[in-house]
Amino acid sequence: VTSTGMEPRLRIGELAERVGVTTRTIRYYEELGLLGAQAERSKGAHRTYGEADVSRLRELIRMRDLLGLSLEELVELAEAEEARAALRDQWYDDPTDEERLEIVEQATAIAKRQLALVRARQQTLEQFAAELEEKLVLLRARRRSLKRSVS
Amino acid sequence: VTSTGMEPRLRIGELAERVGVTTRTIRYYEELGLLGAQAERSKGAHRTYGEADVSRLRELIRMRDLLGLSLEELVELAEAEEARAALRDQWYDDPTDEERLEIVEQATAIAKRQLALVRARQQTLEQFAAELEEKLVLLRARRRSLKRSVS
DNA sequence: TTGCTCCTCACGTCACGTGAGGTGGC
DNA sequence: TTGCTCCTCACGTCACGTGAGGTGGC
């Protein structure tokens, strides 16, 4: 493919280092269909990646670690997004405004669901933090009274 | 053991349901030394648990899910806490105030470390949330302009 | 006595880790 | 040509899931 904006391609080890995972993880995600398997890669040839793959992998890792989603759930999410992308590509040259609107609303729904998951996590973490702060207050009080009787 | 405050004991299934895990998880954690294996349980006898075990298991699950700690890391944390508890029990009947102070300061250190992990997670989640909010702002703008040209 | 929950193996699974042995690009 | 990174199996591991077959308490 000869495109105008030829970005430098990364090898799997470089992608791994930039995102902070191992090459094994990247190959496994490709096996599951989560990451771009370039169709033209012949058997035994090196994998190469672009900046879009860096963002995508970072996003996947974030969903996995911060929201605790399983790879199966990530595959489902990805399939939903790919369905959107397919629609978009299909009508890319001549989409009506109604079709554009539909695509925007689907993207909005996905982002809202993700945001809801993030907000829920934040709430649980805030409760956890509050309990720890309370514990520290109690410990500080005990420390003060002990310091008094020691001195 | 004949104690004055005999609380009703839970069976493993009840503990599992109250904390939201499976019985397999509870048995596995016991195997790793994370959960109280009553010394007096004879081979094949039922396991029983008290309210303290409910709190402890909830705490472990929270560390695992919210902070992403491995069970090995939880075991290390537990060992540190048990060392504290051992010290406390050893001197329980006659601890000097210096010893009490030492115990309080160790507990404070542990709580502070946990709180730091929680705060770090919260920061990462907040950044994630901010990116999603920004995305939603862009989507809303596109939606508005599309709505205009459709109507 | 009848269910129900419990028990202990023990093999299966998910998400990779970790070599083994070999090929390809700067 | 020499390293270095890459490749593909393929078995190992962690944190459980999931029966198989059997015993125990309301």
Image (cartoon, coloured by chain):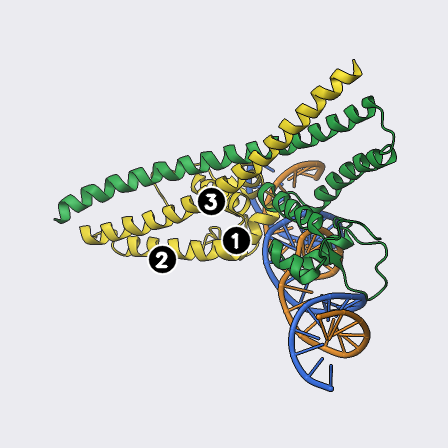
Chain colours: A green, B yellow, C orange, D blue
Seen at 82% across and 34% down, the residue is A88
Q: Is residue B33 visible?
A: no
* Left or right: B53 in relation to A147: right
Seen at 46% across and 43% down, the residue is B118
**Residue carrying label 2:** B83
Which of pointers 3 and 2 lies earlier in the amino acid sequence?
2
Q: Residue furthest front?
A: A4
Specify the subunit that label 2 lies on: B
Tell me whether marks 3 and 2 sit on the same chain. Answer: yes
Give the camera-side residue of B24 and A66: A66
**Residue carrying label 3:** B120
Specify the subunit that label 3 lies on: B
**Residue carrying label 1:** B30
Question: CB under 8 Å between callouts 3 and 2?
Answer: no
The residue type indicated by label 3 comes to Ala
Question: CB under 8 Å between callouts 2 and 1?
Answer: no
Q: Alpha-carbon neighbours of circle 2 within 10 Å: few (<14), some, or many (≥20)?
A: few
The residue type indicated by label 2 comes to Ala
Specify the subunit that label 1 lies on: B
Element under disc 2: helix
Element under disc 1: helix
Q: Position of residue D12 (x, y in %)?
A: 66, 68
Seen at 81% across and 23% down, the residue is A97
Discs 2/1, front:
2
Seen at 22% across and 54% down, the residue is B99
* Distance Cα–Cα, label 1 vs label 3: 30 Å
Q: Position of residue B134 (x, y in %)?
A: 60, 31
